[in-house]
Image: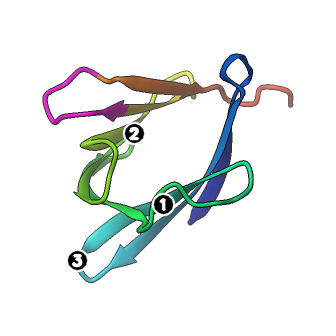
Protein backbone atom coordinates (compact mmCIF):
# COMPACT_ATOMS: atom_id res chain seq x y z
CA UNK A 1 0.00 0.00 0.00
CA UNK A 2 1.25 3.48 -0.73
CA UNK A 3 0.02 7.02 -0.18
CA UNK A 4 1.13 10.60 -0.48
CA UNK A 5 0.10 13.84 1.13
CA UNK A 6 0.71 17.55 0.78
CA UNK A 7 1.33 19.68 3.87
CA UNK A 8 0.66 23.38 3.36
CA UNK A 9 1.18 26.12 5.93
CA UNK A 10 0.26 29.39 4.15
CA UNK A 11 1.23 31.58 7.12
CA UNK A 12 4.80 30.18 6.95
CA UNK A 13 4.85 29.90 3.13
CA UNK A 14 5.74 26.23 3.64
CA UNK A 15 4.77 23.32 1.42
CA UNK A 16 6.11 19.80 1.57
CA UNK A 17 5.06 16.41 0.30
CA UNK A 18 5.53 12.90 1.65
CA UNK A 19 5.42 9.57 -0.08
CA UNK A 20 4.92 6.52 2.17
CA UNK A 21 4.77 2.77 1.59
CA UNK A 22 3.54 -0.08 3.81
CA UNK A 23 5.25 -3.34 2.95
CA UNK A 24 5.27 -6.83 4.43
CA UNK A 25 8.86 -8.13 4.57
CA UNK A 26 10.74 -11.04 6.12
CA UNK A 27 11.35 -8.92 9.26
CA UNK A 28 7.74 -7.74 9.58
CA UNK A 29 5.56 -4.91 8.30
CA UNK A 30 7.56 -1.79 7.46
CA UNK A 31 6.39 1.78 6.97
CA UNK A 32 8.87 3.68 4.80
CA UNK A 33 8.78 7.18 3.46
CA UNK A 34 10.52 10.26 2.20
CA UNK A 35 9.65 13.95 2.44
CA UNK A 36 10.29 16.41 -0.33
CA UNK A 37 9.82 20.11 -0.89
CA UNK A 38 7.90 22.21 -3.34
CA UNK A 39 10.45 21.51 -6.10
CA UNK A 40 10.53 17.78 -5.21
CA UNK A 41 14.01 18.04 -3.72
CA UNK A 42 14.17 15.36 -0.98
CA UNK A 43 14.50 16.51 2.65
CA UNK A 44 16.26 13.28 3.64
CA UNK A 45 19.21 11.60 1.90
CA UNK A 46 17.83 8.20 2.94
CA UNK A 47 14.19 7.25 3.44
CA UNK A 48 12.90 6.82 6.98
CA UNK A 49 11.79 3.35 8.12
CA UNK A 50 9.45 2.28 10.91
CA UNK A 51 8.38 -1.24 11.88
CA UNK A 52 4.95 -2.40 13.04
CA UNK A 53 5.22 -2.99 16.79
CA UNK A 54 1.58 -3.47 17.79
CA UNK A 55 -1.74 -3.86 15.97
CA UNK A 56 -5.35 -4.86 16.31
CA UNK A 57 -8.54 -4.16 14.32
CA UNK A 58 -8.60 -0.44 15.22
CA UNK A 59 -5.00 0.41 16.16
CA UNK A 60 -1.48 0.19 14.73
CA UNK A 61 1.79 1.44 16.20
CA UNK A 62 5.03 1.76 14.25
CA UNK A 63 8.41 2.42 15.90
CA UNK A 64 11.49 3.93 14.34
CA UNK A 65 14.04 1.58 12.80
CA UNK A 66 16.23 4.17 11.09
CA UNK A 67 16.46 7.77 9.93
CA UNK A 68 13.18 8.91 11.55
CA UNK A 69 12.22 12.34 12.81
CA UNK A 70 9.96 10.70 15.41
CA UNK A 71 10.22 7.70 17.72
CA UNK A 72 6.82 6.33 16.74
CA UNK A 73 3.53 6.89 14.97
CA UNK A 74 0.17 5.45 15.98
CA UNK A 75 -2.96 5.11 13.87
CA UNK A 76 -6.22 4.69 15.82
CA UNK A 77 -9.70 4.25 14.35
CA UNK A 78 -12.54 5.63 16.49
CA UNK A 79 -16.05 4.10 16.59
CA UNK A 80 -17.43 7.08 14.61
CA UNK A 81 -15.00 6.41 11.76
CA UNK A 82 -12.34 9.05 12.42
CA UNK A 83 -8.72 8.02 11.94
CA UNK A 84 -6.23 9.67 14.30
CA UNK A 85 -2.53 9.73 13.41
CA UNK A 86 -0.28 10.55 16.40
CA UNK A 87 3.48 11.15 16.20
CA UNK A 88 5.69 10.92 19.33
CA UNK A 89 9.22 12.34 19.52
CA UNK A 90 10.28 9.87 22.21
CA UNK A 91 8.78 6.58 23.35
CA UNK A 92 7.18 7.99 26.52
CA UNK A 93 6.25 11.46 25.21
CA UNK A 94 2.75 12.74 24.67
CA UNK A 95 1.91 13.01 20.96
CA UNK A 96 3.60 16.10 19.56
CA UNK A 97 1.74 16.07 16.29
CA UNK A 98 -1.76 14.69 15.76
CA UNK A 99 -3.83 14.61 12.58
CA UNK A 100 -7.48 13.56 12.59
CA UNK A 101 -9.06 12.36 9.36
CA UNK A 102 -12.85 12.62 9.07
CA UNK A 103 -14.88 9.96 7.25
CA UNK A 104 -16.69 10.95 4.05
CA UNK A 105 -20.37 11.07 4.96
CA UNK A 106 -21.60 12.55 1.65
CA UNK A 107 -23.27 9.33 0.43
Confirm whether the magenta stretch covers residue 90.
yes
| Residue 26 place in picture, x, y as percent | 26, 83
Magenta stretch in the rendered image: 87-94
Neighbours of disc 3 within 10 Å: few (<14), some (14-19), many (20+)? few
Q: Residue furthest bottom?
A: 26
Question: Which element carries disc 2, helix, strand or loop?
Answer: loop
Answer with mark 1 or mark 2, whichever residue precedes in sequence.
Answer: 1
Q: Quadrant of residue 13?
A: top right
Say whether residue 55 is left or right of residue 35: left
Q: Residue at x 38, y 74 (%)?
A: 24
Along the line of sight, the residue nearer the viewer: 67 or 19: 67
Picture coordinates of residue 20, whole percent (x, y): 53, 59
Comes first in the chain, label 1 or label 3:
3
Instruction: Name the residue beneath numbered marker 3.
Output: 27
Magenta stretch prevailing secondary structure: loop
Tell me the residue that label 2 is attached to.
58
Cβ–Cβ under 8 Å for marks 1 and 2: no
Which of disc 3 and disc 2 is earlier in sequence? Answer: 3
Q: Is residue 28 left or right of residue 37?
A: left
Vertical order, 2 against 16 (above or below): below
Mark in front: 1 vs 3: 1
Residue 10 visible in the displayed image = yes
The one nearer the camera, 72 or 104, is 72
Q: Which residue has dot 1 on it?
A: 33
Q: Nearer the viewer, mark 1 or mark 2?
A: 1
Mark 2 burial class by Cα count in 10 Å: few <14, some 14-19, many 20+: few
Q: Position of residue 36 (x, y in %)?
A: 61, 54
Give me the C-alpha separation between circle 1 and circle 3: 17 Å
Amino acid sequence: MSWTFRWHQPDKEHVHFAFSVLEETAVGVLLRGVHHGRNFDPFEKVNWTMQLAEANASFAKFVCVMNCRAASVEFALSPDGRLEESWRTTADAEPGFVVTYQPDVSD
